[in-house]
Image (cartoon, rainbow, N blue to C red):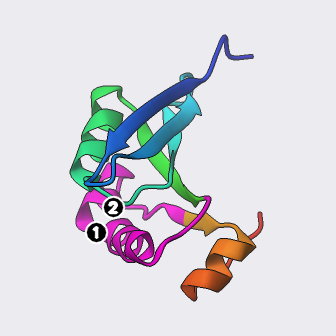
Amino acid sequence: MSAGAYIKQLELGPMQNFVYLIGDPETRECVVVDPAWEIDAILAEAAADDMRIRDVLITHTHRIMSAATSSATTSPGWRSSSRKIPPRCTCTRRSASSSGASARTS
């Protein structure tokens, strides 16, 4: 069992939103929680810590955040960060219905 978890809080964007990297220090994989701004900064933080972004989790949405997240998760930066495997983007049912996306349950 791991001695701890990898957790990093980033304050990004014009509205100073919190984005989180949460992962396993043994597997070196993490998820990004609520990315919307400064995608390059998120990718740089994960890379600097030798972490591979596996998934994207969306806990809530705003119209501007949804658009930024959508374009971020389809960008080449996300794909190269995850070794050409695009991360899954998962959101709550409520967030999905307000943004027009579909929620995935795992």
Does 27 lie within the magenta span? no
Please indicate whether residue 84 sits to the left or right of residue 92 in the image: left
In the picture, the disc for residue 79 is: 2
**Residue depicted at 31% across the width and 45% down the height:** 12
What secondary structure is marked by label 1? loop
Pointer 1 with pointer 2, Cβ within 8 A: yes
Query: The residue under label 1 is which amino acid type?
Result: Ser
The residue under label 1 is 75
In the picture, the quarter occupied by the N terminus is top right
Residue 61 at what x, y percent from top left?
54, 69
Vertical arrangement, residue 91 with respect to residue 43, above or below: below
What secondary structure is marked by label 2? helix
At label 1, counting other C-alpha atoms closer than 10 Å, the crowd grade (few under 14, some 14-19, many 20 or more) is few
Alpha carbon separation for disc pair 1 and 2: 7 Å
Residue 55 at what x, y percent from top left?
53, 55
**Residue depicted at 38% across the width and 36% down the height:** 10
Q: Farthest residue toward the bottom? A: 100
**Residue depicted at 35% across the width and 39% down the height:** 11
Residue 66 picture quarter: bottom left
Vertical arrangement, residue 66 with respect to residue 20, above or below: below
Q: For the magenta stretch, what is the residue range?
A: 59-88
Query: The residue under label 2 is which amino acid type?
Result: Arg
Residue 20 at what x, y percent from top left?
48, 40
63, 42: nearer the viewer: 63
At label 2, counting other C-alpha atoms closer than 10 Å, the crowd grade (few under 14, some 14-19, many 20 or more) is some
